[in-house]
Image (cartoon, helix red, strand yellow):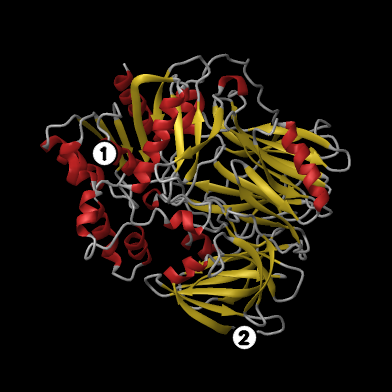
Amino acid sequence: MISRRGVVGGALGVPAILSAWSSVAAESAPVDGPPSLDELLKPSRVRSAALSPNGEKIALLALQDIDGKKIATVTFLKAADPSDGPKTIRIGSINVERIAWANDERLLIWINNNSVASFTSTGSRIGASFGGLSVRRILAINVGGGDEVVLFGNKRIKLRENFDLGYVVDMLRDDPRHVLMAVWEMTRDALGVYKVDVYTGEAELVEYGGATTRGWDVQDGRPVLRYDFNNRGSVLSLYGRPPGDDKWTFIRKIRRSEWEKMDFEVLGASPEPGVLLVANRLEDGEARILRKFDLRTLSFGETVSERLGRDLEDVLVDEKGRFFGARYTDDRVVYQFADPKMNAHYKAMNGFFGNEANVYLTGASADGQRLLAYVYGPRMPGSFFFYDKQAKRFEALGERQPWLTEARLAPMEALDVATRDGVKLRAYLTRPLKPGPHPLVVLPHGGPEIRDSVEYDLFVQSFAAQGWMVLQVNFRGSSGYGRAFVEAGRRRWGDRMQEDIEDAVDQVIKAGGVAPGKVAICGASYGGYAALMGAVRKPGLYKAAVSIAGVSDLLDMLAYEREDGDDSPSYKYWVETIGDPAKDRAMLEAASPVRNAAKVAVPVLLIHGADDWIVPARQSRIMAKALRDAGKSVQHVELRDIGHRNWDEAAFKAVLNPAIACLKTAFA
């Protein structure tokens, strides 16, 4: 199977599987016109898909409406003919995350539950409120159901002590009976590695980490790299264990900030003993590339894959650890394959969707002849497809939200933007289905070190359904375009990064199609900050600004991050990214919306989760006070039991409803 290393998932509260078969829920009749917010937020039906190592079986994990309840189901299909006798079993009324084949006859199901439940001796039904923290477990079942076990089922203390028993370190493809898992040992205050039987659920200790161990990398079922951090997480100690050696050897100690600059990440093993495939940014290099790393000599080897001006995102390896392909993003997902013949197959898959979607490879048979893909795009929320290379057959397996048809969703186009200082940026413009002119919503992304691309976006489609154009800009400071592009945004919050957004808006307006005087800006996290600074800098451009979990005071935010110490990784990151309060105070004040509230001349909506610990809710509270004190129009919405991310349907609705209402008023 093509796989990503380091699977994380799991579940609490595993009910017994019901023996009854269920039929796949029938879909309602097609609906015309832009979708409602309820339709956009309706939970996805198909959650995950997996192809067995021999390529003969496909499993689909879904959430179905059965007898008025949300029931998790698994459907087993024959890869040779998915329509030939599919069988569906009910897992129960419980939240499911994903599935993976442990071997050709056992399927693993990651389950997550926040509900309160009672402890049992077997651990099959475990729970507590735990302040709303998710508790995860992994369930193993036979093909077609039956013989279900909870992994770690023989370790009752582990089941009671651990929130997350879903950390699979390695799938152990050479040992079909076991997987390698990590679990926190309360009595030792350390992580332990266990070999877990997927037939019985029994776990056997392999080894303990040190007191500060936080993870491992594995080759041939054996941990070969170990990561230890100090208590603050600011210093990493790296240990290695070459083939044939049972002792861990200290490699080096490095500050986390230096480690992050190296951008070193193990992405997979290789067939060569002691050699790993790693992502790395050369000291004098621009982009993140794929290289070999030799544990025996502790040195980098040859470059395996690189793409000019683009950062490596992930790697695919086959059953033997051989390099299969590397993933990058241009406007859409692209791959570089080890076998040139695979390029033709991938081109055909993209052509199937008119080269308008992202074809994301998620699995393959051991012989590489059968592939599983997750396909998504601006007008496709996501579907799983099966591809047979020999038969050149591409089949749809299941859609996440089948009621959101292509005809109902708004198209997106890529734009080249020329900035005032001559730099070329990439931006994306989504136009509503009906002819314009249209109001324009500027939607800067969060991070800021992430990026937008041609893909399905809930915020974009929610706004487009209202009849509004949506503009997304990969301003300087965004990731994906190499080191220099990211660093061009460092310490340029409030000026250069804002200018990039303004230049893109100006270009779109000049191109035509924007309703005169109807432009607003909305964003979340860093995007919320950019929305507020947009209102400060360009009061004549925007009709309203919506900040969702946004930063408003850079000095106050730095003080918050400093609570963990001057050497904490997060504080050092903020100082490098925004500025040093001891040296750059004037710059930070000028770039803080809360200290420039008097310059705001448009209505402002502030939305923040009360449980946000990444950008604390105080950031919106002090901005609301500053605007009120300055006599400005402001609405402040603070949402209970909502954090910075990982929102559910109710949270998205609580955020989007007031945002849409604010923008409607501004555009009236």
- Image coordinates of residue 142 in percent, x first then y, are 74, 49
Tag shown at residue 33: none
Tell which residue pokes out farthest to the right in this image: 390
Residue at position x 35%, y 48% from top?
496
From the viewer's perspective, tell me whether residue 252 is left or right of residue 627: right
**518 vs 408, nearest the viewer:** 518
Residue type, numbered disc 1? Arg
Quarter placement of the C terminus: top left
**Mark positioned earlier in the residue sequence (1 or 2):** 2
**Residue at image mark 1:** 537
**Residue at image mark 2:** 247
Picture quadrant of residue 605: top left
Picture quadrant of residue 546: top left
Disc 1 to disc 2, C-alpha distance: 59 Å
Q: Nearer the viewer, mark 1 or mark 2?
A: 1
Q: Residues within 10 Å of mark 2 (few under 14, many from 20)?
A: few
